[in-house]
Amino acid sequence: MKVLLLIPILFLLISCNSPEKMAKTAISENLKLTLNDFKSYEPVEFGKLDSSMSKYEKSPRGQALLDSSDKYSGAYKHLNDRLAYESDPRIALVILNLANKRLEQSQSFVKQFNKEAPFYKPQFIGWKMQHSFRAKNLAGNFGINHFLFYLNPELTKVIQTSDISEKALETK
């Protein structure tokens, strides 16, 4: 009888973890899988838990526009490189015209992206938290690391990490 009474109480205690604690647990679980030497892991600082919103450049439409711009920009660079080695002025003129057309096409996709981006409505996609920690690298030396961890909406799993070590150094 007492055991049956303890089960709901234990469930309440386990499920009442704060969101910050759940995020820290998920981050720790992720580091167990990704660090070279998890036994050397020493937490330094956890940032504030914040919501993570979608971005237009990661949306299917925004990504398609940027990819198209990159494609034509790459073609422009290739033609421009080829132009440097062309000795026939007639062929050079054809290449120059084609290169300029590719540049215009690339710029039109960027212009369309910039036109649509202000109207994009970001969606909640999960959470993010900064974390600084010390750990040994492959050479066995300690180093301090600064990462931004993106977590799923349930705060149970890290879905993406971003090394912000350079940015952390710039702000100090």
Image (cartoon, rainbow, N blue to C red):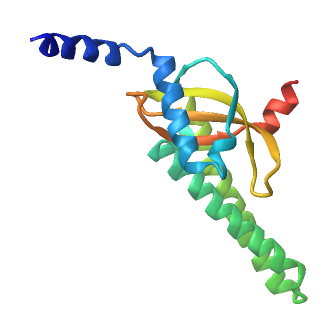
Residue 66: in sight, yes or no?
Answer: yes
Tell me if residue 156 comes above or below residue 143 in the rendering.
above
Residue 53: in sight, yes or no?
Answer: no
Tell me if residue 77 comes above or below residue 92 in the rendering.
above
User: In what quadrant of the picture does the C terminus appear?
Assistant: top right
Viewer-side residue, 92 vs 37: 37
70 with respect to 2 (left or right): right
Residue 18: image location, x then y, percent: 44, 14
Rendered residue at 63%/50% (across/down): 108
Residue 137: image location, x then y, percent: 75, 51
Rendered residue at 75%/64% (across/down): 100
- Residue 71: image quadrant is bottom right
Tell me if residue 45 comes above or below residue 107 in the rendering.
above
108 with respect to 79 (left or right): left
Q: Residue furthest front?
A: 2
Tell me if residue 10 comes above or below residue 114 in the rendering.
above
Rendered residue at 62%/55% (across/down): 69
Residue 151: image location, x then y, percent: 48, 33
90 with respect to 50 (left or right): right
Viewer-side residue, 163 vs 62: 163
Residue 37: image location, x then y, percent: 66, 49
Q: Residue furthest bottom?
A: 88
User: In what quadrant of the picture does the N terminus appear?
Assistant: top left
- Residue 144: image quadrant is top right
Viewer-side residue, 55 vs 88: 55
